[in-house]
Image (cartoon, helix red, strand yellow):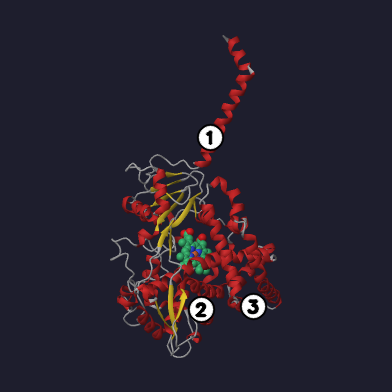
Amino acid sequence: MDELLQKVIGHEHFRKIALAIVFFAVAGVLLYRAFFPIRYPADLPRLGKDEGISWRDMRKKFQTDCTAVFEEAYEKYSKRGKTVLIPVFGPHDEVILPPSALHWLCKQPDNVASSLAAQIDSIQPHHSLGHKFAHDPWGGMLIKTDLNSALEAVCAVMNNELGAAFDAVFGTDTENWKEIELFPACRIIGGRATLRFTLGDSPEGRRLCKDEEFVQSCYNVLDGMLDTAGDMAAARKFLRPILGLWASRNMPAKLKDLQTRFEPLYRERMQILEQQATNKEMKVPQDVIQMMLQYAIKERREEALSVEDMTKRLAMSNFGTMHQTIITVHNLFLNVLDSDREFNTMSVLRDEVARIIGDEGEMREKHWTRAKVSSMTKADSVTRETLRINSFIGRTVQRLVVAPGGLVTEDGIHLPQGTMVSILAHQSQTDGETFTDPFKYDPWRFSRPREAAADKVTGKPGLNNLSFVSTSSDYLAFSHGKHACPGRFLVDFELKMIMAYAVMNYDIEFPESYGGKRPANTWFVGFGIPPLDVKVRVKRKKTA
Ligand code: HEM
């Protein structure tokens, strides 16, 4: 018998078959691990499983009607305090935690549930810009630590930039109505205001803010980053290192163009830094790029000395400051116009601006302060209501589980390393149990209670927890907790100043064919997309 076995094993043909079996088994395991990299536990509920809906059908449903998937997850699981797995864009899945887990999730250390790893996963900046720009986000860290000190200075000068931007886009004709495309207009107005904060506090910076080709170049890079992120989200993770090269193929040319336009400003600022080294009393520009160079020269010297690297830092900063801000400016205009017939929104906003900022003389000469901005309760309410009802992100407080041992949820489910978790934003913000008439845009939804609770002597608005910048489990567009968007304090006064400038200087209306109603936003693969082809009619006020 032994002899027979020896003969068979020793047989060349048998050895080949055995090798092939081993090869295919190993390849099968590797492929399985590549296609299903995360092994979710059996006790993690899958959306639709109880109703017998296959995962494939649920995934198809997400691609065509993500809102239906979000709503089902929210009603059946989130509202009952339960965790659930849903399919998301491309071949990926995500664990949705209930809003009741918000504080628990925010308290998780970064080495267990990482916000940065989640951001890298969704934006893919290592492909569009390069590894260190993704994994060493010191620019964003500066926004967190130094934004506050720069805000007052920016607040004082941004209005001037807005005046020039409005003139360029809305025009100065006081006799004739002009029809314009709103989204491109918001890109220029919001873009210039944002760039004023990023790099506009020097002669070269002010020139760049006005330079349409420079602003467009910033958007070209931003759009390229969004395209790369979109292509990569559609791909399986194991294919991303190869596909990334293809998806980001247009980035070098876009970055080169931005670098050429940015270089004179870079040289100007490096010279200022040199002069400052010998003259400590010297007044330096108060903007992000100066903050970044000052930091980099001490902490990342080789980056500071490279205009190419600093261009990429600028691109990363623009991604954070411009993308969602512009969408919000656009939604804000649409909502203010839409609600005007019922709520007299523009006129009420005008009264508030006149009371707090004054209506005499040129708007662009007005002196804005942070204190004035935060006392604008009505403007605060229209902006918060806009982000409540029209948030761009469908999921918020996104975290990637990075701890090798995984993470156990509050309801006892073990989530393995690599799991993406989040909370549903739009559904939490439009829950009928929290908000009356939850899908209606009510411009004074938050100002009413704040005014009712105002200090009887000073008139200062009460209930600060209902302000634009104050996040909570039913207002999550800026996320929440230690990683909540630090840029919201800038967005706060940017939106209010833009809206104030618009209502004080222009009559604005929808074309007659709209019947006074804004075209609705649509939800696509998890994001709330505003209608991008909306037109508005504008006419400069004679009194302005
Ligand atoms: C309407 C406009 C904006 C919205 C809706 C928004 C929303 C968000 C969200 C949802 C996050 C993720 C937070 C998390 O992971 O928990 C975030 C992070 C961040 N945002 Fe914004 N953002 C906006 C504008 C801005 C602006 C203008 C800036 C800069 C001035 C900015 C700077 C940042 C930074 C640095 C982070 C990273 C924070 C961290 O990781 O700790 N954002 N933002």
Mark 2 or mark 3, which has the lower sequence index?
2
> Which picture quadrant has residue 55?
top left
Residue reaching furthest front? 513
Quadrant housing the C terminus:
bottom left
Residue 523 is left or right of residue 50, and the answer is right
Q: Residue at x 62, y 13 (%)?
A: 7
Q: Tell whether circle 2 marks a residue whose Cβ is less than 8 angstroms from ligand 1.
A: no
Residue 385 is left or right of residue 130, and the answer is left
Relative image position of residue 164 (x, y in whole percent): 53, 82
Q: Residues within 10 Å of mark 1 (few under 14, many from 20)?
A: few
Provide the residue designation for mark 1: 29
Q: CA distance from mark 2 to mark 1?
A: 58 Å
Provide the residue designation for mark 3: 204
Say which amino acid is labelled 2.
Val
Q: Nearer the viewer, residue 391 or 284?
A: 391
Secondary structure beneath label 1: helix
Say which amino acid is labelled 3.
Glu
Provide the residue designation for mark 2: 169
Residue 176 visible in this rendered orientation of the protein: yes
Secondary structure beneath label 2: helix
